Amino acid sequence: QVQLVESGGGLVRAGGSLRLSCAASGSIVYINTMGWYGQTPGKQRELVATITRGGITNYADSVKGRFTISRDSAKNILYLQMNSLKTDDTAVYYCNADVVLTTRGLTNYWGQGTQVTVSS
């Protein structure tokens, strides 16, 4: 099995910055696409940013120019640098990964989520 553990969330004022991390562990051969998704109460989980194994990135329009997704593939760690935060960025942020395991094929995993709260 695989565990994705997020960290770095918290309370920050509008205009501030946070850096989220997601560490993957387990019987991992390699990880394909990784991503961050945000969810607010009563709404569906929405894409924030993704990054492929080759480093190709994709961002939601609402975060372009403010957030940067990156990864350390050697350590199986995903990052999200969040700058110029807005109150609308308040959400639980979930890490997602397409993982190839030693014991089975490609499997999708979610982390437990980390709360980001941006105050005005």
Image (cartoon, helix red, strand yellow):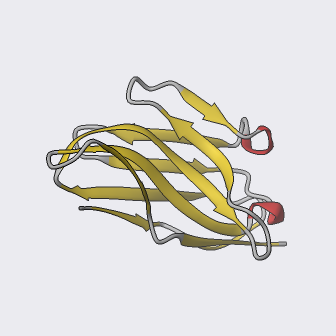
Above or below: residue 17 compared with residue 66: below
In this picture, residue 52 sits left or right of residue 92 = left
Quadrant assignment, res 102: top left
Residue ID at (75%, 61%): 89
Q: How many marks?
A: 0
Residue 52, percent from left and from top:
45, 30
Horizontal arrangement in the rendering, residue 44 relative to residue 107 (left or right): right
Question: Hey, which residue is sitting farthest front in the picture?
Answer: 104
Where 71 falls versus 117 (above or below)? above
- Comparing 118 with 37, the one in front is 37
Question: In x, y percent, where is residue 88?
Answer: 82, 62
Q: Residue at x 39, y 40 (%)?
A: 71
In the image: residue 33, left or right of residue 73:
right
Instruction: Tell me the quarter of the picture where residue 17 sits.
Output: bottom right
Residue 73 higher or lower than 55, as above or below:
below
Quadrant where the N terminus sits is bottom left
Measuring from the top left, give residue 38's x and y in whole percent.
Answer: 66, 60
Answer left or right for 3 relative to 12: left
The C terminus lies in which quarter of the figure?
bottom right
- The residue lying at 49 percent from left, 57 percent from top is 95
